[in-house]
Every structure is written in structure tokens, then in C-alpha cells.
């Protein structure tokens, strides 16, 4: 089974050569952090209210992408969702690397090193099983192009993709403009997703304000 963290990782890969789409660093890290927390919520390990993110069940999920965060939440003081988004985002690069390794182990991706301009080595992740990676993107587009009630996991993935600006690189400007009303409709269907979106937006605006203040 492919989890939400792995699905957001697949969504961030290009179709052909296995390079990542170009998104801001914050977008990549917050999407990974949001996926971890949403997955834990979907597994009934955590929940949120208007002020806090709190533990429901500290039983490990058995998923190495999720359980370190679950253990930290269980051991720590109660904090709000924004705190945990920022905290998990600090190690999002390691979580993404583990997700990629898991996808390679499952035979969904392959891994190879290439040289750019004969000097710089970069790592690519072309698909070994292209249908699974394509299925993630096609599934989301089917949701956005229909009026059907989507699966809750698709709602969470759309919430993340919207909050982190991923749709801006996956869709043309015209496509995105046409789909904005449907995206807004879908993101209102999940309370956890709304909470994560607000937290990510709060962090993004705080980072933008801090950056502007130093210009």
C-alpha cells in the first residue's frame, strides 16, 4: 500500500525522467510535514481542534515515515497544528528520502545517478511501475473534473497540493483558474485538511513577512 507521504512524493516527481518538479523549498517541506500529520489523523492517532493538535492513541502504526512523529507528539506537551507543521518540516528532507527509498523497495520507482553538464551529480527516480505514479495524478484530476464526492484520502491530498502550491506547477494557468472553484469546494470537505491548510498558510505568511523584513 502507498501511504499519503509516498503519494505526495510521487505527485512531486516529473512523469518521464524522475526529476522533481520545481517548487519552493517551503512547499516541499510543508507538504511532507502535512502528509505525515494527515496520515496520523487518518489512522486515528491524532486529532485537532481550533487551538490544539492532540494525541488520541500512541500505538505505533508500523510505518517508519509516521511513527517518529507520533512518538514525539506522545512525549511532548500539547501544541497547536502550526507548531507540529514547522517541527516535522525541519526533517522533511529525511522523511522524503525514506519515502523514496520505500518506493524503490516496493518496485514503484528506480534510482539512478546522472551528471548535469558533466560536473554536477544529481539523483533521478524514474518509474519502474509507471501506472501507480500516474494513478495518483489521474485520480486527483478525476476528482477535480467531476461533481462526485471524493474519497477522504483524495481530499487530504488535494488540500496539501493546494496549500503548498503544487497545483501551480502541475497545471497550466488556465487549467488552474478553471479548477479553483472545485478545489475550494473539495478542501472544505475535510476538517483535518482545513486545519492543516490554515496552519501551512500561517507558517508561509510568517516566513514571507520575515523575509520581506530583511530586504
Image: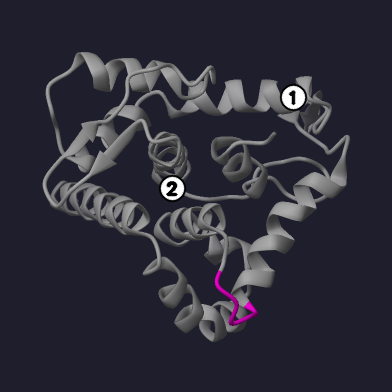
In the foreground, 213 or 56: 56
In the foreground, 83 or 115: 83
**Dominant SS type (magenta):** loop
Which-is-in-front pick, marks 2 and 1? 2
Q: Position of residue 136 (x, y in %)?
A: 70, 53
In the foreground, 194 or 119: 194
Q: Position of residue 101 (x, y in %)?
A: 68, 21
Residue 58: image quadrant is: top left
Q: Residue at x 57, y 60 (%)?
A: 151
Residue 123: image quadrant is: top right
Provide the residue span drawn in magenta: 145-149
Q: Secondary structure at mark 2?
A: helix
Residue 7: image quadrant is: top right
Q: Residue at x 69, y 71 (%)?
A: 142
Query: What residue sits right under mark 1 in the picture?
Result: 119
Q: Position of residue 77 (x, y in %)?
A: 12, 22
Tell me the distance, in whole angstroms, between the alpha carbons under discs 2 and 1.
28 Å
Query: What residue sits right under mark 2 in the picture?
Result: 27
Amino acid at each position: 500500500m502507498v501511504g499519503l507521504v509516498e503519494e505526495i512524493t510521487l505527485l512531486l516527481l516529473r512523469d518521464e525522467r524522475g526529476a522533481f518538479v520545481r517548487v519552493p523549498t517551503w512547499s516541499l517541506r510543508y507538504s511532507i510535514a502535512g502528509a505525515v500529520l494527515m496520515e496520523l489523523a487518518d489512522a486515528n492517532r491524532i486529532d485537532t481542534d481550533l487551538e490544539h493538535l492532540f494525541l488520541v492513541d500512541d500505538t505505533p502504526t508500523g510505518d517508519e515515515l509516521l511513527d517518529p512523529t507520533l512518538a514525539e507528539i506522545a512525549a511532548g506537551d500539547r501544541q497547536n497544528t502550526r507548531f507540529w507543521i514547522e517541527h516535522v518540516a525541519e526533517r522533511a528532507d529525511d522523511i522524503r528520502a525514506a519515502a523514496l527509498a520505500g518506493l524503490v523497495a516496493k518496485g514503484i520507482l528506480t534510482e539512478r545517478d546522472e551528471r548535469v553538464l558533466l560536473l554536477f551529480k544529481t539523483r533521478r527516480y524514474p518509474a519502474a511501475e509507471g501506472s501507480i505514479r500516474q494513478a495518483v495524478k489521474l485520480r486527483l484530476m478525476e476528482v477535480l473534473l467531476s461533481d462526485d464526492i471524493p474519497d477522504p484520502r483524495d481530499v487530504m491530498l488535494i488540500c496539501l497540493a493546494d496549500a503548498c502550491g503544487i497545483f501551480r506547477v502541475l497545471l497550466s494557468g488556465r487549467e488552474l483558474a478553471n479548477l479553483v472553484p472545485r478545489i475550494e469546494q473539495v478542501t472544505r470537505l475535510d476538517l483535518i485538511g482545513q486545519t492543516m491548510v490554515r496552519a501551512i498558510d500561517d507558517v508561509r505568511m510568517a516566513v514571507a513577512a520575515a523575509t520581506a523584513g530583511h530586504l
